[in-house]
Image (tube, rainbow, N blue to C red):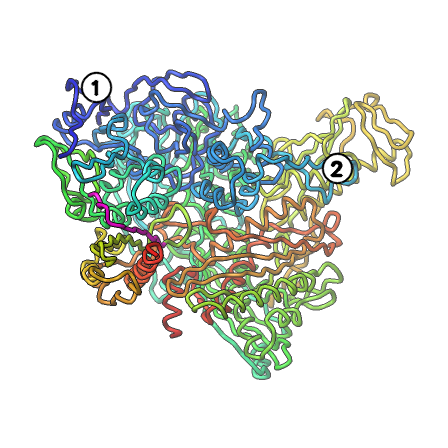
Amino acid sequence: MTLDLRSGTALEAAAVDVTGTVDVSFTLNGRSVVLAVEPMRRLTQVLREQVGLTGTKVGCDAGDCGACTVLMDGEPVCACMVQAARLDGATVETVEGLAERDGLPHRLQQAFLRFGAAQCGICTPGMLMSAVALLRRCPHPTEQQVKDALGGVLCRCTGYSKIIQAVMRANEQLPEAARAEAGTAVGCRLDRLDGLAKVLGTDIFGADEWPQDSLVVRVVRSPFHRARFRFGDLDGFVARHPGVVCVLTSADIPGRNLHGVIAPLADQPVFAEGEARFKGEAVAAVVGEDAAMRHLDLAALPVEWEELPAVLTPPEALAEGAPAVHLARAGNVLVRGLVRHGDPQAAMPQADAVVEGSYSTGFIEHAYIEPEAGWARRVGDRIEIAACTQAPYMDRDDMAAILGLPPEAVRIIPTAVGGGFGSKLDLSLQPFVALAAWKTGRPARIVYSRTESMATTTKRHPSAVTARIGARRDGTLVAMEFEGVFNTGTYASWGPTVANRVPVHASGPYRHPNYEARSVAVHTHTAPAGAFRGFGVPQSAVAQETLFDELADRIGMDRLEFRLLNALDNGVQTVTGQVFAQGVGIRRCFEALREPWRTARAEAAAFNAASDGRLRRGVGVAGMWYGCGNTSLPNPSTIRLGITAEGRVVLHQGAVDIGQGSNTVVTQVCADALGLPVEQFTLVGADTDVTPDAGKTSASRQTFVSGKAAYLTGRALRSQVLLRLNAAPDARLTLDGPCIRAGDRVLDLRTLEADARGYVLSAEETFDPPTAPLDENGQGEPYAAFGWGAHLAEVEVDTDLGRVRVLRLVCAHDVGRAVNPTLIEGQVEGGSAQGLGLALMEEFIPGRTENLHDYLIPTAGDVPEVRTILIEEADAHGPFGAKGIGEQVLIPTAPAILNAIRDATGVLVRHLPVTPDRLRRALREQG
Amino acid sequence: MAKYMRARSLDQALECLARGPCRIIAGGTDVFPALGDKPIRDDILDISGLCALRGITHEPEAGHWRLGALTTWTDVIRADLPPWFDGLKLAAREVGAVQIQNAGTVAGNVCNASPAADGTAALLALEARVEVSGPQGLRLMPLGDFVTGVRRTALGPGELVTAVVVPDGGADPGVADFLKLGARHYLVISIAMVSVVLRLRGDGVIGRAAVAVGSCSPVARRLTALEARLTGRAPRALAALVEAADADELSPIDDVRATADYRREAALTLVRRSLTRCEEALR
């Protein structure tokens, strides 16, 4: 017999329209709240839009990312999946309730700041709330307990290590914050200067703030990879939908309906005209009042679609008779790249051993946790656009062209950026909100859905690579041939950059007397492939570095020593004929791995000897080089520094901090160049109206290029002060209110006249790294400096299931000078986690994996212990010798893991990702 | 315009359902992801306030344990339950992550009828039944009959799942296990999963064996031939009893997570491992 729960009087449940409201009474961060809510509104929306608490972030609206974690009745839940009506009687705690009064951070928030656990900060509130629930039950958790508690929150920046550390140590005595005297900031583990807002959850991302009375924009997108389309009665649609203000199409664009990050190749329309060329391409945007837009069914917009045959892969696109993605680009080829050095075809027969292999990788999604968001408003004849971006000045110029305005009439105000990794270099939402604001005269805002973000923004290029490498019996390289086909998607985006960078870098950091690398970027009807941490180099490194292991084995050399033997050095020609007199640090990186390599190999051998064969361990290494800044193109950054009469030192730092730390690093460099402590600096963040152009946050250039500009600016201002005081070049400066002192000489700033910006002293300097063009054989000096590195991976393979666990990574990087070691470790841990994802789990399939449960990125449970070894082989151009690190950290991880899997099992999987089924099939084929 | 109704009692809920079809929401972990940014078209019946439906109770006179429809996965993890619930507890820890376990319900997982429902395999191995309330009163259905296909159940018009019940294991020692295989840790949809429940007889041999496999067929399946082979055996070297043909009861598909061939093989690998783990637990 079963208990019958029916009881009481059968009162009818009151039915309300889902768009109507019900009253709920609940406790929010300790206070009683009564609200009228739409019953099925997501709690995230209630908190953010109704209550104004935007610390709770929205990453996916599907429970896949955990960014919206709040505590409901004390337990962590995803606020995006709590219906508002359920709030009645509940207790809700958000990140805003975590901090002490007066914005004093909770000790967990302090720990996040101190240990560098927040990079971009978008996952931080979700991490904090998940962790605080654990810490209440268990004040001193183990690593496993922390991972279990944080497993439901994705982070794409940090690689989780520092977050786990912060949670484990939150209830211990925290280390004091590092402080740097004047002139000692470089090399110091300062807390991230913009970190407090990130750990408090008060940083303002693209979706977190908007002008009152903003209209909401939603974009209508192609449901097909390729389709002809025709609009029906759009005016009728607007008339039938109260609250909808207008529908925007290509006809509403006052300027040109084209944009692109490489101006001469600009080919991407804001709205497709007549034919949509990838699934998710925008064809129209609906603009209206928030309440109306929230309940609008976009599918009701009258569009007739006629699906057309599409090409989704390069072989299809290159086939005879394939439909042209762009009529002007014959054969669907966007661009080809070539580097040729020596004569590999003639030399190859002299090799004692030759290895060859074909490889492939798929689309990789950036999967930052912040979907694109922002707003725009018209101010007279100007437009202001606040959005997440990595490239404010490029946005400005492209938006000016789209709106038919002079560049000065466009103001780009980057919001905090919740991860970028290359994709937020390209325009996404900006044209939609700008056009809406321009046309209606009212501010307009947009927040992309996760699916919209994944389906329509740029991806890492899928690659198909074939390479052949030969060596002599003594281990010296004889020749290398490389050919890479890259799927560049519908539009040019950064396809040419990938096609140019790959042939330069496909050699790896080695001396190749004879080398030829060819690349081609091929258009298909897929989302544009663009910039993603490494611009094609991670893909080429997979081929070259795994072939190196096979080659070393063939000639019977230790795999690490083989690399060392062939490693580049000062005074040795690279494959583009460039010779560096200084700054080549790759040998030291490999040397730093010798001891870990020996130890790890011995441990793996002992493990395998004792194993029944089901679990096997292996160790792999891989090297990397990566040029800082644009390839043989101008790449300037400008930084401004001013001092007011009151003695405020203001740094106009326009290098967008997307979590990597440029706000902090650029300031550290500038402070030491000027000779005043960082804490006396006030930062003015990127804004095209108030910060000079510091270029894009891309190509690992901000520390190197903008850092150098900051260095030059700091030195220039210092010279002015010294000149006015007639002080010695090495004089110690101090600033005390309006008085600046050098030794015993005092300059009263109030006696000086202020310029138009209010500064009595100011300097503005530009740095453009010296490069030389590449000739028709790709010979020349593409970069002023390279970053160098090598990773060692230890893996355990479950051979019956093909499942790989990465146990440990040892990452040696030559950073020239470690300006802030904590931030660099953060880059290494986060970048290598992305490399791990590339190796083992990530593949974007257009139309199929447009969410964060089908597209997998590593969780807290997947990342290994990461040991970072920093090498400082100073570069003559870099600020205090510093080089870039942002992309370098990702490149060697995947090949090191593949080499470790091969070391463990004898099987090399050449088609990524190495999912369990692929590895298991390879193991079976091996027998 | 779609309506929203929040039930204050089971009767209210059933009356709502009697008036017409509704999308039922409890923990919200399936409803909201499916909704995306589309407008709500279906009438919604919110049963999340029916506190009486939450919790796990032992009902010896009925010979079963009752998991009320609003019992969350965290409730399962924290409940004091006999050892043959260990497989269900392990499955509970694999449902999404903590956030999902705190909100998602056992009954919701069953009703959502995903081939990859972590709970279904474990509940099948426990020979769970689904308690359905409706216009005709209560009925109990075997879980294997309740879930009829991908996203399909035997829930009729006007009906609501009010509990999942698990038959009492009796006094005989039992052991249970659950293994999930995914391409990452946490927040992952299974490539394959296996749950095993073994109950010993007084003489120390296996009296009843249940082996269920999920994510390898439209609905999680029991490997009945293997179960028959296991019955009557002493709990030793059980993995050797698994035969390649046992996978014939499965009908996996190729998808973004794995190929069908791989699933077939991996499922049996997991079964062997789970049997060995059960053996070890019995020692």
Asked whether A656 falls inside the magenta stretch, the response is no
Considering the whole magenta stretch, tell me its main secondary structure: strand
The subunit carrying tag 1 is: A
Look at the numbered discs 2 and 1 and tell me whether their residues touch, using CB distance below 8 Å: no
- Above or below residue A510? Residue B109 is above
Q: Quadrant of the C terminus of chain B?
A: bottom left
Q: Visible in this render: residue A397? A: no
The subunit carrying tag 2 is: A
- Above or below residue B212? Residue B97 is above
Q: Nearer the viewer, residue A344 or B159?
A: B159
The stretch in magenta equals B167-181
- Residue A305 image point, x, y percent: 26, 45
Q: Residue at x 31, y 65 (%)?
A: B237
- Residue A350 image point, x, y percent: 59, 83
Marking on residue A14: 1
Q: Quadrant of the N terminus of chain B?
A: top left
- Above or below residue A468? Residue B74 is above
- Residue beneath disc 2: A180
- Residue A820 image point, x, y percent: 68, 44
